[in-house]
């Protein structure tokens, strides 16, 4: 089984001389994915409000879906019967499915974790389910994504050393079982490094998992409410322990400033629902920070909200029109904002990659961050907590 | 002023020999509109969930917007400042603006009607407003639609003869004032025939209005909850009183069977929010009637919901996928269903027009109606009542 999991699906092209930033390529059965790359989140087999064509127009080469969500609705067997996930959602480029470890540990209720697996109640109808590492691989093989994820136990960011240690050990054992359970040889299996905010546990987790030899390594258990400097420090610690020739995937990161910081620390792959979630609240990414279209200042602006932007929304509509749509709660508003934010992030990743290839990444990053006003951290954390509490479906 | 309002914007091409159905063309500053035609409703300067490109892909040549809604939000002055309604909503084909008479009489509260105009409170924030015929023309000239509507008083379908009579007289006086108030010479002004379910009043209303000479005539005050046979009888009565060489517009009709019945009675133009409203509830038009995608029978159907259909939704997605999106309340669901229903109606109108031109309209209509199962009238009326009561914004 080792051979399968060492699928050489990553080509490292260039590393920045001033930082750990790298440019590469993921080779998948559904096309090449240039890295660093950001994956729009389509948990339920749809990037919220957008068609596959909208996403292609933006230039997206890979999206994320979620095995936990799809297992609950519409059910893995339905998607398999419909010809697999690509055909089901009419997306012929690459897909990564998350195993749903994070969702089971954040959305489902009445969880009972044992070494065998996890018993939980559905966040939708309360029905009881047992998920094991073997099952999650079986599900993801039936879905047929290009990249699949091992089952992990994802502790809360403020859990004790002891609890995080147990979760990391279990994640290691589960990754081993996932690897052994894999039957298809055309899917790259990534393991997820856990260890919370404890460098020692990150070290152990990475060491164990890399000894098994996976096609890629994710950094899990971050961006859960901890301060940003901790997220970055743990990313740095973890990346240092991962092999050079395998892709690194930082889960749950999606704000422009965080993405550049992650890239500078050697991360190749990111995903987050943030760009589309904040879009639906009227926040548009711009070079200067997030602009909220609901501010009355936009009600009579004939220019696009981001005059530098080449997306469909900014090419077509004035800020005043977008302001009007949000004022009226018109559904088109959410789609137009989602297109803008995903386009912004996709362009940012493309520019970062070009800069890495040209040897100018450090100055590119510095220039961007000097003008980009990040959202105040306290506001961010409050928003995140509010969202974590309020959501019933997640993304 | 007569000359302006007699703008020759309609060319009658052919009349059916077995029915009153007619094929023609509306000539507008934003292109030719083949008739009979159905106008998708974009009251707030957006056809709900769709971009202008979505609507163009369907082949739509004209949409409806609403002066009442746009007056309240974002305000007429804002749209004027943004370069007019076409530019504001990024739609370069034809637009018809309804005056909002119906909305003022169905949505607004604390109405006080006098011969001068109508004082009402906004359904959004309760603010008080006075609308007069002169103002409504001023608003519609600022918006800049290709076809504009006179202000009418729209009584409820079960109002007394006396009340309907008063409303019809007032509508006549207001139409006269609208005509006199018109300053632009590039907009076709249509008057609205009222008279409720009383043939005598329809007769009077039509006679008065045609004596003033408008560019087109609408049949208002129908599809408000009265039985369908009454709608059709009143349409027949009214059309008979209208000049041959002017377009006839039946307001608020949008189900496939009603459209064919309206065409057979000599109507050229229709509008209704029904196709997009029922789409958002999961009802897809098919040759056999409305299919509700939420039925569990669709959960594993790999075919499109309407295998005969050439729309983007049916070309791209299985019924199972649409069922899944509706189950998850995914916003994309509403858009995909809206595309399908508008495409269905647009195709129906194109086929009806070809049949009129080929002299085969009667058999086309009979064939369609024999297989199309209309929604049960009692269910329809209940749905309509429920909707009229529940809506706060209208379409």
Image (cartoon, coloured by chain):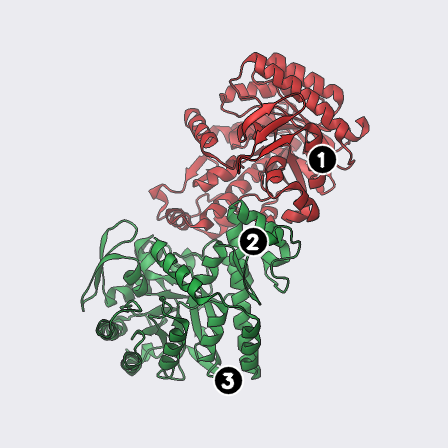
Chain colours: A red, B green
The residue shown at (24%, 67%) is B134
Judged left or right of residue A212, residue B304 is left
Judged left or right of residue A253, residue A218 is right
Label 2 and label 1: CA atoms lie apart by 29 Å
Tell me whether marks 1 and 3 sit on the same chain: no
Q: Secondary structure at mark 1?
A: helix
Q: Earlier in the sequence, mark 3 or mark 2?
A: 3
Tell me whether marks 3 and 2 sit on the same chain: yes
Q: Secondary structure at mark 2?
A: loop
Q: Chain of mark 1?
A: A
What residue occupies the far bottom of the structure in this picture? Answer: B17
Q: Do residues under tags 2 and 1 come within 8 Å of each other at their CB atoms?
A: no
The residue shown at (56%, 43%) is A47
Image quarter where the N terminus of chain B lies is bottom left
Identify the image quadrant of residue A198: top right
Q: Nearer the viewer, residue A378 or A138?
A: A138
Give the crowd class for mark 3: few <14, some 14-19, many >=20 residues within 10 Å.
some
- Residue receiving disc 2: B295
Percent x, y of residue B309? 61, 63
Q: Can residue A84 be seen by looking at this rendering? A: no
Q: Nearer the viewer, residue A31 or A145?
A: A145
Q: Is residue A115 above or below residue B337?
A: above
- Residue receiving disc 3: B16
Identify the image quadrant of residue B184: bottom left
Q: Secondary structure at mark 3?
A: loop
Tell me whether marks 2 and 1 sit on the same chain: no
Q: Which mark is residue A138?
A: 1
Image quarter where the C terminus of chain B lies is bottom left
Percent x, y of residue A166? 62, 16
Label 1 and label 3: CA atoms lie apart by 63 Å
| Residue depth check, mark 2 versus mark 1: number of the one nearer the observer | 2
Judged left or right of residue B180, residue B49 is right
């Amino acid at each position: 089984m080792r051979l399968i999991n060492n699928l050489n699906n990553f080509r490292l092209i260039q590393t920045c001389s001033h930082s750990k930033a790298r440019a590469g390529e993921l080779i998948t059965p559904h096309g090449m994915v240039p890295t660093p790359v950001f994956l729009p989140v389509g948990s339920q087999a749809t990037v919220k409000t957008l068609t596959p064509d909208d996403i292609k127009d933006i230039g997206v080469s890979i999206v994320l879906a979620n095995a936990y969500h799809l297992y609950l609705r519409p059910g893995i067997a339905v998607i398999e019967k419909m010809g697999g996930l690509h055909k089901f959602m009419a997306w012929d480029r690459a897909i990564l499915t998350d195993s749903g470890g994070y969702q089971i540990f954040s959305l489902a209720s009445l969880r009972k974790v044992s070494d065998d697996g996890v018993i939980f109640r559905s966040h939708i109808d309360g029905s009881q389910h047992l998920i094991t590492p073997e099952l999650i691989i079986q599900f993801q093989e039936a879905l047929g994504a290009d990249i699949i994820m091992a089952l992990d136990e994802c502790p809360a960011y403020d859990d004790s050393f002891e609890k995080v240690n147990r979760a990391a050990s279990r994640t290691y054992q589960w990754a081993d079982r996932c690897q052994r359970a894999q039957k298809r040889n055309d899917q790259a299996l990534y393991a997820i490094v856990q260890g919370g905010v404890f460098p020692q546990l990150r070290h152990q987790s990475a060491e164990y998992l890399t000894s098994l030899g996976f096609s890629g390594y994710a950094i899990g258990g971050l961006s859960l409410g901890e301060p940003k400097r901790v997220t970055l420090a743990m990313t740095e610690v973890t990346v240092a322990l991962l092999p050079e020739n395998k892709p690194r995937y930082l889960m749950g990161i999606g704000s422009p400033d965080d993405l550049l910081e992650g890239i500078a620390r050697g991360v190749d792959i990111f995903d987050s629902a943030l760009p589309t979630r904040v879009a639906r609240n009227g926040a548009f990414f711009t070079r200067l920070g997030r602009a909220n279209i609901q501010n009355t200042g936009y009600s009579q602006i004939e220019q696009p909200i981001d005059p530098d932007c080449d997306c469909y929304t900014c090419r077509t509509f004035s800020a005043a029109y977008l302001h009007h749509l949000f004022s009226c709660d018109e559904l088109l508003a959410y789609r137009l904002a989602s297109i803008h934010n995903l386009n912004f992030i996709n362009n940012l990743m493309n520019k970062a990659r070009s800069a890495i290839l040209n040897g100018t990444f450090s100055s590119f990053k510095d220039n961007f961050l000097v003008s980009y006003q990040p959202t105040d951290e306290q506001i961010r954390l409050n928003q995140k907590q509010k969202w974590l509490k309020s959501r019933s479906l997640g993304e």
